[in-house]
Image: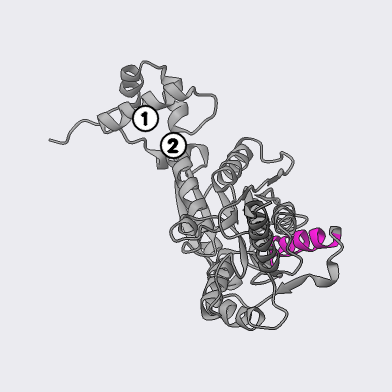
Amino acid sequence: MSQRKTTIREVASRAGVSLGTASNVFNGKAGVAAESRRRVLEVAEALGYRPNSLAAGLRRQRTRTIGLVVPDVLNIVFNELVEHLENIALSQSYEVIIVTSREDPEREHERVRALLSRRVDGLIIVPTRDWSATEREMRHHRIPVVVLDRVAAQDRFPSVAVDNAAATRLGTEHLLGLGHRDLAFVINSTRLWNSAARVEGYLAAMRAAGLEQRARVLLPGMTEEETRAGVLPVLTADRRPTAVFTGSNVATLGVLRAVQDAGMSIPQDLSLLAFDDFAWLTVLRPFVSAIRQPTEALAGHAWRILTAAFEAPDRPAEHIRLPAPLIVRETTAAPPMKAAARRRMKAFKDTAEGAPP
């Protein structure tokens, strides 16, 4: 004899809420108090209740699934975004189907078509450099879409990202404030709008400081090895930078390898500031100063905008740009010559103070 299935009415009764409240929890609707939502989910888990989301979705012409498209899951920023979005989906009884584009526009288009064939309710996408075919496909299907992280100057769809230009301007001003005048900004590509915005923020800070002629933007390539090979000659040249600002985690890894190959020490010989903050930046000394992307907030806004479109598909497109804080650690310091001059001045003062009258 098969075991009788627990009903949603039993879950509601045990959790001490109305049937409508329990239904709203499993349907992911807003307006349910956090404590009530917690009790319903805990009772459902204890009783082994699983809502028939497929049947409910068919009744509403919804499947309670979200498609998530990212370039890859090895990049820590994308990995964090995936984790946060899955956590939100779990809390609201949604499923997330994750696919990767591997920076290939054709693969991206095919993976999105696969998601659409699964009748996902909406899409959150971190697009490739040229996603025009994908964009046309999504417009054709008139499906709710949010563009995340790699946004454009004028997005047709709602979009969520950090204010990249403001973030790199903040970081550049930090290095200028330490006394650096020879700063190199290393970025893998300017074909992505957010990368181009990071370059513009760096250049804007250099212009404001009257150092536009000394600004250097290095484009060594898309991989860690290409970055290492492209940056190494710059670090070993006669007129080398005293500080490097990296525009991505790939660029940071490549620059760190180039620094090792050049036999340099950070920050004694070179200051380093990274865009994107990760746990491994504080594993080995010196700890790396970084611009931190608020990935949890980015994921939260993307989810909110997407699910709001389910109830109001014609609502105006939102474009969210979040600040990215600067985390100052141990790899940013005064330039080598100025630091040496300060040490000499301190030694002179110590000697003078200790000299007999």
Q: Is residue 98 magenta?
A: no
Name the image quarter holding the N terminus.
top left
Q: Which residue is mark 2?
A: 91
Nearest the camera: 262 or 171?
A: 262
- Label 2 or label 1, whichever comes before in sequence order: 1
Q: How is the image coloured?
A: one colour
Q: How many marks?
A: 2
Relative to residue 13, is residue 104 drawn left or right? right
Say few, some or many: other residues with alpha carbon within 10 Å of mark 2 (under 14 / 14 to 19 / 20 or more). Answer: some
Nearest the camera: 129 or 282?
A: 282
- Name the amino acid, label 2: Ser
Q: Residue furthest left?
A: 1
Q: Which residue is mark 1?
A: 41
Q: Is residue 196 magenta?
A: yes
Q: Residue furthest front?
A: 357
- Percent across and percent down for residue 334 are 67, 60
> In the image, what residue occupies the spot 74% across and 41% down?
316
Which stretch is magenta?
191-207
> In the image, what residue occupies the spot 40% across and 17% down?
17
SS type, badge 1: helix
